[in-house]
Amino acid sequence: MRNKKFALKFVAISAVSLALLTFNWDRVEMENRAFVVVMGIEAGEGDKTSFSVYLSVVDAPALENGGEDAPKLLYQAEGASLSHALSQAGGGMSDRLYYGHTKAIVIHKDALENPRMVREIADTLSQKGEINIRTIVMATDKPVSEILQTKPKGGNLLGTYLSNYFGGDGANVASLAIKADLEGFDASLRRDGTAVLPKITLEGGGDGKEINIGGIFALKNFAYIDSIPEELLAGQIWVKENAGGMELVLDDHTALQIIRSRPKITFAMGGDNLICHVKIQATGNLVGLHSLRNNSELNADFTKKIESQITTTHGLFQYMGVDGLMLTETLHKKYPNIPLQPIEKITIIPEIHLEIKAHGS
C-alpha cells in the first residue's frame, strides 16, 4: 500500500514538474520569436522562375509593448523553391519566425502568370502547418515590398486592417470585394485549376500612398488570365453574400440603399445546360433625392438593375471560363452525385423579390 502511495505521489510530482518546464520553455520560445503578419511573394529576378519572398515581421516583445505602433521589420529572401526562400528568410533565423499569426498573403502578378509557381505556392503554404487555412490571399501588380511597408488608414497593422476590411461575413460591400482564403484558393485550384483573388494595390505617390482594394485577378489552368474591375463585380455580392449596405442608383438619380439580402440557389437541367436559379430576398430604403414615381415603377427598375448586375458578372466569368460565383462548388455540395459542370454550361436566372421602403421609414 505504501509503495502504491509513493508511486502515485512520484507520478504527480513528475507531471507537475513537466508542466512547469513545458510552460517555461514555451514562454521563452514565444518571447524569442518574431511574428509574420503579412507575407508577400513575387517571381525572382532574372528568368522569373525563382521565388522572392517578403515577410512583414513584428518581434513579440515589441508587439506586446508597442501594440499597433510596434516597429515592423521587412525580411526578404530568394530561393529556387518557395520552401527554400522561406527557409532563408530572416537572415538564417527562420526558426525564430512564427507564421501562426499571419493575416494575409499577397502574391504578385508575375508569380501568378507561371502555372508551376501557382501550384507550388498553394501546395507549400497549405501544407505549412503553422499557417491558418483562413489566412487571406490577395493579388497585386504593384511591388509587394511597397504594399507591405504602406501603413493603412487608421494606423493598423496591414494584416489587422485586411482582416477588419473583409469583416466577419468575408466581404466588403463598398468595394464589392469578397475574401479569398488559403483553403479556398488551394481547393479551387485542385478542383479545376481556376481561382479568383481580390486585388490589392496602391494609390498616390511618395508618402501619400494609400492601400486600395477592388477588382479581382482571375486564374485559369493555374495561371493569371485577366482582371475584372470592381464596378462589374456587384453580381458576386448578390449571389454569394448579404448585399446590405450596397447602394443602387437609377438613371434619374433615384437611389436605393439595400438593408439586407439573402440568396437561395437551386439547380435544374435545361437541355444540355444546367439552369441555376438564384432567388434573392432583398429590402432597401430610398435615400437622397425624392422620386416622383410610384414604388411599383421603382421596384421594377431596381429589380432589373439587380438582375443585370448578376447576369453581367456571371457573363464575364463565363467568358473567362472561371467559376467566380462558385456555382460548381455549390452544385457539388447540394448534389454530390452530379458530375461537375463547366461554367460555360451553367445558365443563371435571377429571381428578385425586392421590398422598397419609403424615405425615412
Image: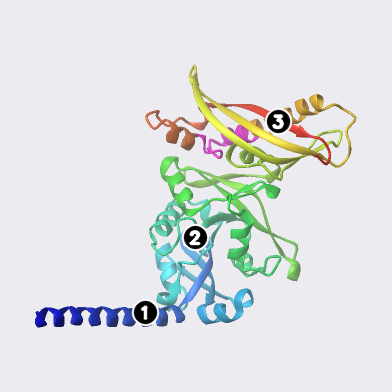
Q: x and y percent of residue 358 in the render?
A: 82, 35
Q: Which mark is residue 47?
A: 2
Magenta part of the chain: 313-327
Mark 3, secondary structure of its residue: strand
For residue 134, side relative to residue 201 (left or right): left
Q: Residue 159 bears which disc, if any?
A: none
Alpha carbon separation for disc pair 2 and 1: 47 Å
Q: Nearer the viewer, residue 122 or 168?
A: 168
Q: Residue at x 39, y 32 (%)?
A: 336
Look at the numbered discs 2 and 1 and tell me whether their residues touch, using CB distance below 8 Å.
no
Residue drawn where x is 15% and y is 83% of the image: 6
Q: Is residue 306 left or right of residue 224?
A: right
Three-letter residue code for mark 3: Leu
What x and y, as percent, mark residue 229?
Answer: 68, 45
Looking at the image, is mark 3 or mark 2 earlier in the sequence? 2
Which residue in the protein does label 1 denote?
A: 23
| x then y, percent, for residue 195 | 51, 45
Q: Which residue is mark 3?
A: 354
